[in-house]
Amino acid sequence: MLTLQNLTKKYGQFTAVQNVDLNIQKGEFFCLLGPSGCGKTTVLRMIAGFEKVTAGSILLDGKDITDLPPNQRDVNTVFQNYALFPNMTVCDNISYGLKIKKLSATEIKQRVERVVNLVGLEKFITRMPGSLSGGQQQRVALARALVNEPSVLLLDEPLSALDKKISEQTRIELAELQKKVGITFIFVTHNQTEALALADRIAVMKEGVIVQCDEPKEIYERPTTRFVADFIGNMNFFEGKITNQTGEEITLNMNKAGTFQYRSSRNLSVGKDVIFCIRPERMKISLLPPSDYENAISGTIKQKIYLGDITKYIVQTDTGMLIDVIAQNYLIQLSNEFYDLEEKVNVIWSKTSGEVIYA
Amino acid sequence: MLKKIKEFYILLFPPAFWLILFFVVPLLIVFVFSFSTQKADGGVQYILNLHNFQEVFQGVYLKVLLHSFFYALVATVITLLIAFPISYFMAFATTKIKLIMMFLIILPFWTNFLIKIYAIMSLLGNSGIINAFLMKIGLISQPLHLMNNSFGVMFGFVYWNLPFMILPIFSSLDKIDVSLLEASLDLSASKAQTLKKVILPYSMPGLVAGIIFAFVPTMGSFVIPEFLGGTNDYMIGNVITNQFVKTRNWPFGSALSMILIFLVMVCISLYLRFYDPSNNKRTVEI
């Protein structure tokens, strides 16, 4: 288990990472997610030992490794640019760490063979890294780290340099690989789709602080701050107040969009300033009035963006707000519900949809 | 395609012309001279024979050649030992420090060579700055002999060679991606192992260039031994200069020059046999 306690990193006056507390379980696929400059890579580099810790501590399986040099930590890194040794063959790259540790030749051979099979590099073992494609180089970097069988594997945006198709393919392989080897993975990315697809848990970072740490589904469905809600996926925001709560029935009075009903088992404080946020795919466009379990706002379709699998509508409400609504194209075709630009419509959503965040 | 080739030849012409006129032709002249004989008035008589070469291989000149080779070798090794740490520090320093150091290293090029030699003399001489300082603080009572001996020559060589060694080593170290060093440390290697397995292989092209830049001019040098050396520090460059300037035996001087060129070429090709800088495999560029 990896424990970060109050981990802080300062560069002069600038605080890159502030009081990060995390417990990462053995075998967990953990993801640090955030925009560039949020400190996620600094956290990773402190775990690897490349950055000195300003304050706080790092414990690996109960042992304090805060001040150990990188070569004495049972942790390996897959670098963003792969950092393969260009003057060594794939095989020499992979066996580098084992040779340094002075393992026997037969053991090195066995371990290299096993890991090479695992990542599917059999054909490339004698090649030089420079002659490999980005995806292949990425596997070599992965194999070179995994062959050491570390307690924790750190991955610094390993998919960001690959093109979309290969990145998606590699993502699937990475998830399978992690299950097979059972090593703790800590994965740094700014790509929310990667994080949602891969992680057991995600820590969303902003300006050096972890703003929310939870399972992907919770992060997506139940963001606790506007930042998380906005950073992950698309989101519509309405600002206003809670005016009433009777059991699970909550009344929200929105500054620019009138009064909504919201159903939740949460106990919310009446009178507080809140932000109601709802995903575009949770809303639909209709010419009919809402049912009694639905909310509605009337507006005009201002833009229609065809994206293949979906169509994105931008609707301007009568109060002047812009709302994104996403519809599945196959559903549009099934129900024959085509809407035109400038058409007056209702935007409808279920009272159970969306999330209330305290402003 | 044909047009491109034409452009290539047009661009090639000026440097080729220059090299042929001022490098190949003089070299050929020296080559022909080396098989000729000295006239009584100091001119060249074109009676081709091997007499000059026979004379070279008789004793004293061979000794001077060997001596020069040894000096050049030692000077190169000392320069290397000083230049590598400086280059290393420079390559991994911040951009600002890098620029300042680069400026300091290039600065001596703006000064005339002879002025620099005289500056060294005023530094190392018996009543020079170093001796005056050491005597003033009472560390020594007699001036140290820092000049007109092999120490003076070595000092001069190392001083002269340093920038030529530092710059190529720096330029190859500077290209090393820091993440490669981090990767090595990450894979359990110590700093010493990283130096040996990652940094040294990458600095090889610069090391080779630096060694050649230091060794070759030192081998043929004559000004530094003349000014800073003693009577025993006579190098092959001094012998050749004397043959041309004092004894006016151009054919014999030419023969010595040909042998020097041949020896230097043998050294370089032996060196390149073991390491070919054009065949390095720095192909991963990110």
Image (cartoon, coloured by chain):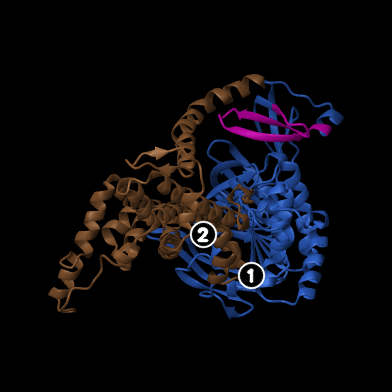
Chain colours: A blue, B brown
Q: Position of residue B190 (x, y in %)?
A: 56, 72
The circle on residue A209 is 2
Prevailing SS of the magenta stretch? strand
Q: Residues within 10 Å of mark 1 (few under 14, many from 20)?
A: many
Q: Which contiguous range is marked in magenta?
A: A305-330
Write the residue at 62% across / 58% down. Answer: B274
| Residue B194 painted magenta | no
Write the residue at 64% across / 66% down. Answer: A76
Does the rendering let one see residue A49?
Answer: yes
Q: Residue pushed farthest front?
A: B40
Q: Position of residue A164 (x, y in %)?
A: 72, 42
| Residue A315 painted magenta | yes
Which residue is denoted by mark 1 in the rendering? Answer: A75
| Cα–Cα span, label 1 and label 2 | 23 Å
Q: Secondary structure at mark 2?
A: strand
Residues marked 1 and 2 touching at CB (< 8 Å): no
Q: Nearer the viewer, residue B58 or A60?
A: B58
Does the rendering let one see residue A269?
Answer: no
Q: Secondary structure at mark 1?
A: strand
Q: Residues within 10 Å of mark 2 (few under 14, many from 20)?
A: many
Q: Position of residue B97 (x, y in %)?
A: 36, 54
Is residue A279 positioned above or below A98 on the image?
above
Quarter where residue A337 is shown:
top right
